[in-house]
Image (cartoon, rainbow, N blue to C red):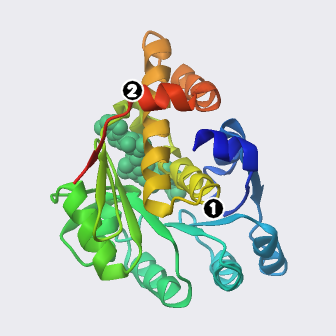
Amino acid sequence: MIDNVRTKHPLIHCITNGVVQNFTANGLLAIGAAPVMSANPKEVGEMAQNAHGLLLNTGTLTDGQYEAMIIAGRAANENGTPIVLDPVAVGATSYRTKVVKELLSEVKPNLIRGNGGEIGALIGAHSEMLGVEGKSDQEPGSLAKEAANVLGTAICVTGEVDAVSNGKTTYLIKNGHEWLSNVVGTGCLLGAILLAYISSTREGALQASAAALAHYGLASEKAYSLAMKEGIGTFQQRFLDALSSLTDEKVKHDTHIQKV
Ligand code: ATP
Ligand code: TZP
Ligand code: MG
Ligand code: MG
């Protein structure tokens, strides 16, 4: 699937937050995708029509961005272009919860990715949100499965163990390193990379997501092994290097993907 992304070089239209624009664009380039950041309501419909995937990330949502998400989301849905929604910090304020629910009534994503707190908040399950950080007491596999059934779309819950579910089949991915939590935007970039995989393969959102999560986790393990003596600044650079240099063979060998 890594090779599929590099061969297709999918155009990923990102409507994302101001904190992570540069990191997201560089991370997409590292895996062989083509990023474009555009959030002006006057052009996003046309941009989304030309793209292979649309990322909607609510990290620093403005009224203009929300309008752009609706226009671009409708265009993508009409064209059958895959959409990933990253409902950053949903549950942290009542405004975010309301607006993300409204967005979901207008636009149908192919995958929603969030930490346990965000996915829990989306389905009214018990969870804690403090700004963009969140957690849930529920095990990620069961939370992803429940949310997929409630929301009618594939769900990815990330954390120490990642889970992705379509409500019937669930995969647990145990690759990754905790230093990812110390670099801002690693969740946001992951949403974009999940989308690049989904838009480059015929296998479907579930399999594509499991592969993307394994790739991402392995890249962080490699980056940690090279940067542990230096610190998280070096780790961030090594992580981009590792995203660009991993091969399908390496991923097959070292992944921890479990079907439950
Ligand atoms: P938050 O806003 O709480 O940081 P997030 O949206 O940034 O959440 P994370 O849950 O941090 O998203 O996931 C981003 C990446 O970091 C995922 O690939 C996930 O597997 C990885 N990750 C997060 N915590 C850990 C951990 N403790 N051990 C290993 N990998 C982790
Ligand atoms: N504030 C608003 S969006 C954002 C912050 C800190 C970035 C969050 O990125 P991530 O990937 O959830 O750590
Ligand atoms: Mg994080
Ligand atoms: Mg996040």
- Nearer to us in this view, 133 or 228: 228
Mark 1 vs mark 2: which is more N-terminal? 1
Across and down, in percent, residue 140 comes to 24, 55
Across and down, in percent, residue 219 comes to 50, 29
Residue 123 appearing in the image:
yes
- Nearer to us in this view, 101 or 49: 49
How crowded pointer 1 is (Cα within 10 Å; few <14, some 14-19, many 20+) is rated as many
Location of the C terminus by quadrant is bottom left
- Nearer to us in this view, 172 or 16: 172
Q: Is residue 134 left or right of residue 9?
A: left
Which residue shows up at 28% across the image and 44% down it? Answer: 161
Residue 16 numbered mark, or none: 1
Q: Against 247, is 18 above or below? A: below
Q: Amino acid at mark 1?
A: Thr
Judging by the rendered image, the residue that carries numbered circle 2 is: 254
Across and down, in percent, residue 207 comes to 44, 55
Q: CA distance from mark 1 to mark 2?
A: 31 Å
- Please, what secondary structure does the residue beneath circle 1 have? loop
Residue 28 appearing in the image:
no
Q: Is residue 49 left or right of residue 144?
A: right
Q: Is residue 235 left or right of residue 74?
A: left
- Please, what secondary structure does the residue beneath circle 2 have? helix
Across and down, in percent, residue 74 comes to 66, 85
- Nearer to us in this view, 213 or 128: 213
Q: Amino acid at mark 2?
A: Asp
